[in-house]
Image (cartoon, helix red, strand yellow):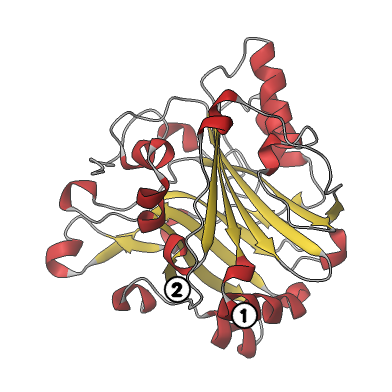
């Protein structure tokens, strides 16, 4: 499958005016009730982007360096700029087993808020992209990041192709860009700063397509290296602040420049602040979900997707 241009479009991209309190101190954009509820709910607060602790924030996109319009010819990168979708929340969850397809659960606060709005005839075109980082251990944790738009995803855009494409395409394109904002030397050395990685190649990713969402479950346990690095970082969680940006990698000229789906700053969280979730709560079956499979491409070595991305500055 070949995706087409993802250059700035006035629909979903424009709706990415930052709703979160940390992204902008002033905004004239009315915040839909379900998004306000999503931002302000959960065990982790939406905190100040510069000084917040034990919460999440929305860092400026310009802090990230992505492939520019002439990357394929000159290997140049440029500031990421505005997100395609708005960060609308983060959940820090704890359970006795791995949590899959959390948006389909009857107790998922974000998707239930959107469903309520839709039932009232509001936000009928809204769409959520969620990234669920599944962290193994005696207790299982999930860090779930939610990004949303009130407008339709532009048909033909790279993001549209990713949302509606097959898992093979998604695995070749789903990328994370990390940026350590604050933390001890050992964490910076282990995680790497400005490091990029194609998650779909490095770890097992399961994709769940619902009627109004795409959830990407990233199984950290599928990579020995990723598992060790993340558990090291969690040991210093209260002193670590990290920016994580998610995007669909551009691989052809007409897909450039790259744009972030969205990014979140995780600010010195307390592990004990996690919301305890019943592992046995069954997901809500949907017609779309029943027709979609999950990708289980397991690569046990975690590495940068290409040399230039490892040197982002």
- Name the spot of residue 159 as percent of width and height, x first: 38, 41
Find residue 194 and name its label.
2
- Name the spot of residue 255 as percent of width and height, x first: 24, 48
Find residue 82 and name its label.
none
Circle 1 sits in a helix, a strand or a loop, which is it?
Answer: helix
Quadrant the C terminus occupies: bottom left
Name which residue lies at 73% across and 75% down: 234
Name which residue lies at 20% across and 55% down: 69
In the displayed structure image, the side of residue 151 where residue 281 appears, left or right: right
Q: Is residue 209 visible?
A: yes
Foreground of the two, 168 or 112 = 168
| Residue 311 sits in quarter | bottom left
Q: Is residue 28 visible?
A: no
Say if 235 sits above or below 305 in the image: below
| Residue 141 sits in quarter | bottom right
Name which residue lies at 23% across and 40% down: 4
Give the residue pinned by disc 1. 229
Foreground of the two, 144 or 35 = 144
In the displayed structure image, the side of residue 4 where residue 138 appears, left or right: right
Say if 309 sits above or below 45 in the image: below
Q: CA–CA distance between discs 2 and 1?
A: 15 Å
Name which residue lies at 18% across and 46% down: 254
Quadrant the N terminus occupies: top left
- Name the spot of residue 79 as percent of width and height, x first: 35, 59
Say if 102 sits above or below 69 in the image: above
């Amino acid at each position: 499958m070949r995706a087409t241009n993802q250059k700035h479009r006035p629909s979903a991209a424009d709706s990415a005016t930052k709703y979160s309190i940390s992204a902008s101190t002033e905004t004239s954009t009315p915040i839909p009730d379900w998004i306000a509820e999503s931002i302000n709910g959960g065990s982790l607060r939406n905190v100040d982007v510069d000084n917040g602790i034990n919460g999440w924030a929305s860092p400026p996109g310009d802090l990230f360096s992505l492939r520019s319009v002439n990357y394929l010819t000159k290997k140049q990168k440029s500031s990421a700029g505005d997100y395609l979708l708005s960060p609308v929340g983060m959940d820090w969850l704890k359970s006795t087993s791995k949590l899959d397809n959390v948006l389909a659960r009857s107790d998922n606060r974000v998707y239930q808020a959107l469903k309520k709005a839709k039932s009232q005839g509001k936000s009928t075109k809204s769409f959520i992209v969620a990234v669920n980082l599944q962290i193994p251990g005696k207790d299982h944790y999930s860090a779930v990041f939610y990004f949303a738009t009130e407008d339709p995803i532009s048909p033909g855009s790279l993001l549209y192709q990713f949302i509606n494409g097959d898992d093979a395409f998604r695995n070749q394109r789903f990328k994370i860009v990390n940026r350590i904002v604050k933390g001890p030397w050992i964490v910076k050395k282990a995680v790497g700063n400005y490091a990029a990685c194609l998650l779909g190649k490095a770890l097992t990713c399961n994709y769940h397509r619902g009627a109004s969402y795409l959830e990407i479950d990233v199984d950290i346990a599928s990579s020995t290296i990723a598992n060790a690095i993340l558990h090291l970082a969690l040991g210093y969680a209260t002193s670590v602040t990290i920016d994580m940006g998610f995007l669909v990698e551009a691989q052809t000229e007409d897909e450039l420049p790259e744009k972030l789906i969205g990014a979140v700053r995780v600010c010195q969280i307390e592990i004990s602040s996690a919301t305890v979730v019943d592992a046995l709560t069954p997901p809500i079956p949907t017609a779309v979900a029943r027709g979609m499979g999950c990708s289980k491409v397991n690569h046990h070595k975690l590495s940068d997707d290409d040399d230039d991305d490892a040197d982002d500055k």
